[in-house]
Amino acid sequence: MAKVFIYPATSLILSDLVARFGHKPLGAALGIRERIQTAGIDSPPLQITPEEPKRGLKYAAVEVPSGVRGRMAIYGPLIEEAEAAVIVTDADLAFGCMGCARTDELILFSLRQSDIPILELNYPANEEEGVQFVAAIKKFLAGLPNGDEA
Amino acid sequence: MKAEYAPDYIGTVTKYVFVESPHMTPGELVLRAYEISEGVLIKETCFGLQVTGTSEAVDRLISEIRTFDPNHIFVKDRGFPPGDPRRCRANLGGARPGYLGHEREFRLLHYITHGLEALERGKGVPEMVPAREKKPRLDIQRLQELIDEES
């Protein structure tokens, strides 16, 4: 079972397909859950404390806004942990404030800089593309360590 | 002085289960899930359910739930436990943060279902078409022509 980073990190479709084909999806929920379940200083809503931008320094320079560094404290360790990644490039649901937008750019940059295998594709817009989408993900995941060769 | 934070549901895992099926409603799914829940907390939602419990118990329940309608049931992780006041719309009003993203992907689920069924039947994969190009924008000369025609 390989650990596969998914982008958008909140994607239902990618999370399901990666798990369905026998691998572990690494998405935003894992990072958030870790913080939500750790006791400490009350810092609602996501328990992002002032420590997070400091941890984010590992992934972004000090002049990068703390909002991006704080977010990277969640995604950075997941990217480091990932053995592969599936990216949907036309995900119009992956938008947000400037902090989210810049973090998304940094996530994609970090993934492409790493040496892990990456599959990039678009969301399906019809049934034919649905077959291609699922087949491409299945084939990609089957080629990963401990995947079932398609 | 900063307030202390004491988390609930420590050591648990929460997962969303989405059902987009002509054969099963979220209500039916939740009833069948309750029958096999064995200590897992289940919350019914408009799109399916949320399950919370230890990792092993949730994984066991999810693998059982998937067998009800494998190509129409979709699962993903959730960071917050169900009913958390920071996320529950009962406290916030309006859609729960993250719901709109789910709604966007929910509309694509029937394409994914079609893909899963086609692969299951061993149907050949249609040739990959090149990535969709963006619609060309209105040419400035064409715009001028349109303006001239109207005036």
Image (cartoon, rainbow, N blue to C red):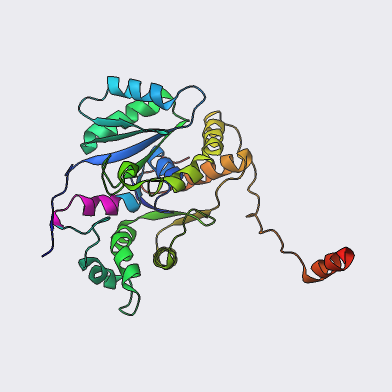
Residue at position x 28%, y 53% in the image: A32
The reply, left or right, for residue A48 in relation to residue A27 is left
Q: Quadrant of residue B69?
A: top left
Q: Residue B92 location, x and y as percent?
A: 33, 47
| In magenta stretch: residue A38 | yes
**Quadrant (top left, top right, bottom left, bottom right) of the N terminus of chain A:** top left
Q: Nearer the viewer, residue B28 or A114?
A: B28
| In magenta stretch: residue A35 | yes
Q: Residue B76 location, x and y as percent?
A: 37, 41
The reply, left or right, for residue A40 in relation to residue B91 is left
The reply, left or right, for residue A149 in relation to residue B141 is left
- In this orientation, does residue A113 appear? no
Q: Residue B15 location, x and y as percent?
A: 32, 39
Residues in magenta?
A: A30-40
Residue at position x 28%, y 71% in the image: A58
Q: Main secondary structure of the magenta part?
A: helix
User: Is A45 situated above or below A73?
Assistant: above
User: Is A86 situated above or below B22?
Assistant: below
